[in-house]
Image: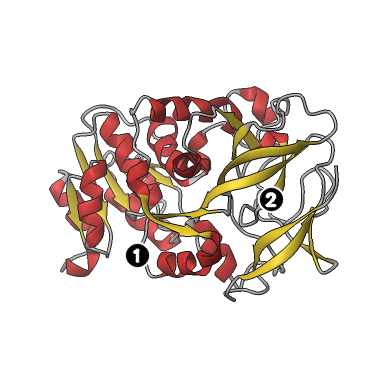
Amino acid sequence: MSTITCKAAVAWGAGEALVMEEVEVDPPNSMEIRIKVVCTSLCRSDVTQWESKTAVPLFPRIFGHEASGIVESIGEGVTEFKEGDHVLTVFTGECMTCKHCSSGKSNMCQILGLERRGLMHSDQKTRFSVRGKPVYHYCAVSSFSEYTVVHTGCAVKISSTVPLEKICLLSCGVAAGLGAAWKVADINKGSSVVIFGLGTVGLSVAQGAKLRGASRIIGVDTNPQKYEKGKIFGVTDYINPNDCNEPVQQVIKRITDGGADFAFECIGDTGMITTALQSCCDGWGLTVTLGVPKVNPEIAAHYAQFLSGKTLKGSLFGGWKPKSDLPLLVDMYLRKEIQIDEFITHNLPFEDINKAFNLMREGKCLRCVIHMPK
């Protein structure tokens, strides 16, 4: 195997437009695979990290983590994959052997968990370079490149019959929302649910709640266009906080007779977590937080919220173990039991990737699928 030269969209600084560069992609090391990326969708967390001036500046960097592709080559010791296999990438892996993977209680792999330093899990090095300069990874995936290298624990084999231009959404956002509703909250029939933020994750929570038989699904968003989209996924009521003459939590408590059974914070605003908690009913109200905050990562809540029996839970990737659980969601999609296509509002060629970033920043898209050159 040899180094590949290909096109990648490289971020050279926080908030700076991505630049199409010729990058060199190393061969896969032991227990790694090199993937020809077919489609990749833009996730809000890509934009948040790209814009962030508070995070450690890891540039130049190749973002992207929601992706589908085809295995181009395999490293030493790889038996699970072969060249030509169709795969989904995942931003948090599953080694199958660590304390968390074997516990049955967690999807937080100790070996292949969320990678924040822009390097490969195995050797803390990068597989990308441009003009001799190393390029950082993102979430150990970096799918805004025609080719990328990932650990085998961060890839899921899927059937070659699954449309790669659709299924890439299961790599993160759609799966995260469904899992938050099903695995983390375990919504029961007849429940009342309030969702703060009707982006892809929030609408996926709505879809999960609808499929679980929730009686009322309240969407809270400042963009009124989101309500029409929300109806497709099960949202029954829409509240625009800008139109309320009282705090939104008061509105929710009034229309749900004391508060919702479940609240989901899908914005990435830690102040909104308090609002979500206050929107839940006493005794058993459960708030699940899914958003990645842009600023102010600290949570503040009055202790009385918890003395009254409410619960606050965090959720990473909806609690799914990626390699064990994602194939089940793929099968559900093939049986038309879950909606994915309806989240795709735009399809763009790779060279227009900056347009995708602008659409996301302006709130004009749910998911934009970026198609690599064939």
Q: Earlier in the sequence, mark 2 or mark 1?
A: 2
Left or right of residue 176: residue 1: right
Task: Name the residue rendered at 36%, 65% in the picture.
Answer: 363
Q: Which mark is residue 147?
A: 2
In front here: 200 or 68?
68
Q: Which mark is residue 296?
A: none
At which x and y percent is residue 20?
A: 64, 68
Kind of residue at disc 1: Lys
In front here: 27 or 279?
27
List the residue tagged with mark 1: 364
Left or right of residue 11: residue 76: right
Q: Nearer the viewer, mark 2 or mark 1?
A: 2
Residue 267 visible somewhere in the drawing: yes
285 to 213, vertically: above or below: below
206 to 76, vertically: above or below: below
Task: Name the residue rendered at 62%, 47% in the picture.
Answer: 37
- In which quadrant of the rendered view does residue 324 lie? top right
Figure colour scheme: secondary structure
Label 2: few (<14), some or many (≥20) within 10 Å?
many
SS assignment at label 1: loop
Label 1: few (<14), some or many (≥20) within 10 Å?
some
Distance between mark 2 and mark 1 Cα atoms: 28 Å
Task: Name the residue rendered at 15%, 43% in the picture.
Answer: 257
SS assignment at label 2: strand
Q: How many marks?
A: 2
At which x and y percent is residue 268?
A: 45, 58
